[in-house]
Image (spheres, rainbow, N blue to C red):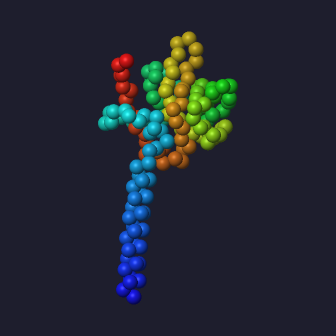
Amino acid sequence: MIKGLFLLSAASILLTNISTAFAEGIAHTPSPCESEFKGQTQGFEKKLNIIAIRDLKNEKDEEIVRVKGKVTKYFGEDKYEFTDENGDTIEIELNKDKDWSFIRKDETIEVIALYDKEFFSADSLDVKCALPPEHPMTQIGIRIPPKTNRRM
């Protein structure tokens, strides 16, 4: 009887430790977008709020932006049309070095991208990561570290 209680107690402690370690592992799991900005200085993050495509003109060239909308057309190579809820469009680039298979035509997503402001052609977004709207990161907001100036 005592041996059985001892084994039950030991099993209970072991399961508690395993579940705690598992929960901590989940809490420290990097987000899908976090790997894009790994190694950046902490504490100076910019809170990325969703911005409408028509308001991108107020952003600086190579600024990191967050836009919500749908992929609506394929232009070829890695170029697509992205349409927001206002019906405004912009070209986005989904680099082939990443797996974008979770993105479906006409399905709402949020993208975090580098804004490419052009003077003689159409502006575009170089997508760094994309999230479906029900993803937990879209609920808590996203903070992106500032760009760093690196000397060569």
Q: State which quarter of the image contains the N terminus.
A: bottom left
Q: State which quarter of the image contains the C terminus.
A: top left
Provide residue 28's location: percent of width, then percent of height. Answer: 40, 49
Q: What residue is shown at x 44% (from left), y 48% (from top)?
A: 29
Q: Is residue 88 left or right of residue 11?
A: right
Q: Residue furthest top?
A: 120
Provide residue 100's location: percent of width, then percent of height. Answer: 60, 37
Provide residue 82's location: percent of width, then percent of height. Answer: 60, 30
Using the rendered image of the protein, determine whether residue 18 is visible from the camera's viewpoint: yes
Q: Is residue 96 left or right of residue 6?
A: right
Q: Nearer the viewer, residue 148 or 136?
A: 148
Q: Quadrant of residue 93?
A: top right
Q: Nearer the viewer, residue 65 or 126?
A: 126
Q: What residue is shown at x 40% (from left), y 59% (from top)?
A: 21
Q: Nearer the viewer, residue 97 or 91?
A: 97
Compared to residue 122, the image places residue 24 above or below, namely below
Q: Residue furthest front?
A: 3
Q: Residue furthest bottom?
A: 1
Compared to residue 14, the image places residue 128 above or below, namely above
Q: What residue is shown at x 60% (from left), y 31% (from top)?
A: 96
Using the rendered image of the protein, determine whether residue 49 is visible from the camera's viewpoint: no
Q: What residue is shown at x 44% (from left), y 25% (from top)?
A: 63
Provide residue 81's location: percent of width, then percent of height. Answer: 63, 28
